[in-house]
Amino acid sequence: MRPVPFSMVILLVAATAYASEQFPLGILGGRGEVAPGSPLLTIVSIDPDSPAARANLQAGDQIQGINGNPFVPHTNRLDDGGQGPQKALGEALDDLASRTDKEQRKISLDLLRDENTIQLEIELPLRPSLESEEGRRLLVIDASRQLVKTMTAGGYWNSPVGLTGDRVLTAWALTALLSAGLEENREAIERAATWLRGSDGKSWIPDDPMKKGPDNLGNWAISATAVALAEHRIATGEELNEPVIERCCNALKSRMSKEGLFGHDIVPGYSNKGFNVINTLSHLAWAMGAQAGIALDEEAWSKSLEQIRRSIDPNGGVRYWTMKGTGTGDASLRTSSMALALSITGQETEMAQQLGKYLATHPSRTREAHAVGSLGMMLAPSALWRLDREGYWNFFREWRWYLSLMHRPDGSLHYIGGKRNNGGDGYLGKHRIGCSIAILMLTPPGERLRLHVGESHQDPVKKPDSVPEAAGASN
């Protein structure tokens, strides 16, 4: 610990002045928070026996920069992404922890402690950078292990809110594990697929799909189940999945109004204004069902497609409703799921490219997705891999800080929320959905899912060890 040069400006900004965002501190070990308008990162807690604890970083410390370079302020603007302390710290940790020379594998934090300005040097354990294939694979392996470890004895992942949350969480965890590698995760994958089918093979969908199921928000679970079981059917040839996928696809068709509108469950949402995110997720379910051998209902597809066609903003994002002026700040899930559905089926190629362009030119918005910070981050990378490879790698660079801060010193992953409503992730179980986010962000280049490529396979594709150089604007 040593004094910081007097020339560094001391910035005392109350971290509680605005709504703050808390997040893990990556390989340092602990939690911090940032607030809009402030360049300070306030330490909330320190993990025992972590690099931060061993260096005596303390709760209440405020980090104002790294090695004499002050942070720029955090903002609440969606288009700024993680700009500010989060991005600076996450990228610095990813860079410095990968250095093989122990003397260079240190980070110098410029701190405010009790109104005194100090510099604290912290030694970091060796960890390969996310810029390398080795680093990306390590994060995928650690996320997969955490998912397998947290699976219940019943073969599913339990959410805080009951059955629908269990179904959604399990479907996306199954998809993530398939993307991480079938052979490496086969036992957990097979148990999850068995559970998703349901003990009676009906996946909790009533024989009359217009009757409410056993829990709320059923269409989120039905669409996710169709995608997951279709990927499992394609990867393994499991024939037991087919009637369940068909049941899911038919249920979604039945729950759509004659105008092509959807809701969370059996009736269109918001006084019959509709709910575009279920339209786009239904399209993805139908598209994946077709890949698994289920006939695509062209009438239902066309009816729903017309609602989406009317909802595309001039910037290419899919709006909340057909009404103009509702914005696209949270459009990543709607846009990516629809882009995937069109790309997978080979339909409306011009529209698919328009949606892909929105995703590629607004990567910093991806975390904000209809009351969740997860599903846009999980599906946009696959859509970009299909539609804009350069856009995919720009997306990865935009969010490298996020993956770095997720990854704690013990190898576990902790969730990082967005700047708006993340309530839906709380319904699912944040750290487990965080594992699925990390896997699905990093694995499209392996092309193990139909979400990634027309002919998916479970043998990894050989890719360059380093990330291609950036080209063009990423914002």
Image (spheres, helix red, strand yellow):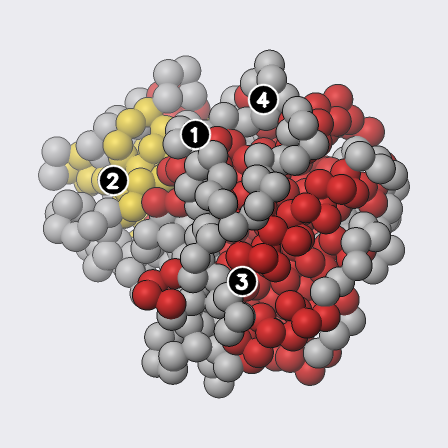
Residue 43 falls left or right of residue 189: left
- Which residue is label 3 attached to? 256
Residue 22, image quadrant: top left
- Other-residue count near label 2 (Cα within 10 Å), few / some / many at <14 / 14–19 / ≥20: many
Residue 356, image quadrant: bottom right
- Other-residue count near label 4 (Cα within 10 Å), few / some / many at <14 / 14–19 / ≥20: some
Residue 263, x across and y down, in percent: 44, 58
Q: Label 1 vs label 4: CA separation?
A: 15 Å
Q: Label 2 vs label 4: CA separation?
A: 33 Å
Q: Please tell me which residue is depicted at 43% across the width and 77% down the height of the picture.
A: 322
123, 380: nearer the viewer? 380
Report if residue 391 is visible in the image: no
Report if residue 186 is visible in the image: yes
Query: Which numbered disc, 3 or 4, marks the residue that appears first in the sequence?
Result: 4
Q: Please tell me which residue is depicted at 63% across the width and 62% down the height of the picture.
A: 283
Residue 297, x across and y down, in percent: 72, 65
Amino acid carrying mark 4 in the image = Met
- Other-residue count near label 1 (Cα within 10 Å), few / some / many at <14 / 14–19 / ≥20: some
Amino acid carrying mark 1 in the image = Gly
Query: Which numbered disc, 3 or 1, marks the residue that appears first in the sequence?
Result: 1
Q: Label 2 vs label 3: CA separation?
A: 47 Å
Query: Which numbered disc, 1 or 4, marks the residue that appears first in the sequence?
Result: 4
Residue 184, image quadrant: top right
- Which residue is label 2 attached to? 42
